Image: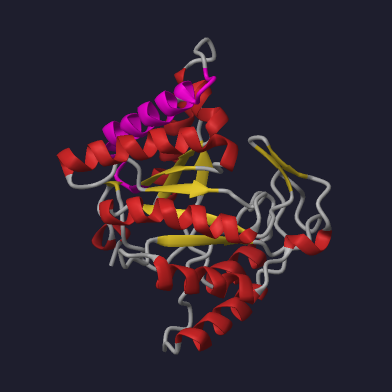
Amino acid sequence: MSLKDLVPAGVITGDNHGFAIPAFNCTSTSTVNAALEAGRESKSPVIIQFSQGGSAYFAGKGLSNSHQEASVLGAVSGAHYVRSVAKAYGIPVIVHSDHCAKKLLEWFDGMLLADEEYFEIHGEPLFSSHMLDLSEEPKAENIEICLKYLERLAPINCLLEMEIGVTGGEEDGVNNEDVDNASLYTQPEDIWEIYEAFSKYLTYVTDLFTIAAAFGNVHGVYAAGNVKLHPELLNKHQAFVKEKLGTDDDKPVWFVFHGGSGSSNDEIITAVAAGVVK
């Protein structure tokens, strides 16, 4: 059975199919094409993602971005471009927006509006998924804001990626280079708190969310061994949530691996085996 028997070529939304997909931040049609070509050559699905800064660059640095209008325009234009060329590369493609901090929510709001308008016409969102990075905020506020947006995302079959804990390093204006080392490791109770909140307060039942849990991750490119990752901790998180849910599913949580550049093959294999899907 080939990949195309499981997932069609072109932009996909909704279901997970049991494997992890690499994500590439793109800032132009050229970088989008390069990522799609790499996916085609390796016979792998890919995630094309746009950051807030990369989105503004995609639209053009000469545009005002005082209220995130250039970032919205660039991300939406990028998503339409990916949709226009993805099928030609013959691989499944996910269109995603990366790290949106609280101070950038106007960007998120603009993309979500485009999703809802696209859904009205096509029956699916423009983007496959979006990420809220509220790791700088108190945990309760992080979960509360994510719940508010998931209430709008779930009915249009759009997945939400959220971050709990802290990823070290710096990316797109979120700087955690000097964070205390203990903060780089999410606790099992944190993961369960998300599930519990979603099950209690979300009015639209959905499993379309992923969690970027911290297990020593650091953004940036490092030689293997220079960052102390512990992806095996994700197994403890899975076991904790499994027990709380009373489910037979050994991997009830869909995890995301941030800061994967420079990681060893063994670290990636361990992470994927523990439920990492991105």
Foreground of the two, 267 or 119: 119
Q: Is residue 76 magenta?
A: yes
Foreground of the two, 78 or 198: 198
Residue plotted at (50% across, 38% down):
105
Q: Is residue 238 magenta?
A: no
Answer with left or right where residue 57 lies relative to residue 230: left
The residue furthest top is 62
Colouring rule applied to residues: secondary structure
Residue 241 visible in the shown view: yes
- Residue 38 on image: x %, y %: 46, 41
Image quadrant in which you'd find residue 174: top right
Residue plotted at (53% across, 32% down):
52
Task: Name above or below for residue 175 compared with residue 226.
Answer: above
* Residue stretch rendered in magenta on the structure: 65-93
Task: Name above or below for residue 33 compared with residue 59.
Answer: below
Task: Name above or below for residue 136 compared with residue 243.
Answer: above
Residue plotted at (67% across, 72% down):
187
How many badges with numbers are in the image? 0
Task: Name above or below for residue 241 compared with residue 136.
Answer: below
Foreground of the two, 26 or 42: 26
- Residue 48 on image: x %, y %: 44, 41
- Residue 101 on image: x %, y %: 58, 42
Foreground of the two, 163 or 200: 200
- Residue 30 on image: x %, y %: 46, 25
Residue 37 visible in the shown view: no
- If the image is split into quadrants, where does the N terminus sit? bottom left
Residue plotted at (24% across, 37% down):
118
The chief SS type of the magenta part is helix
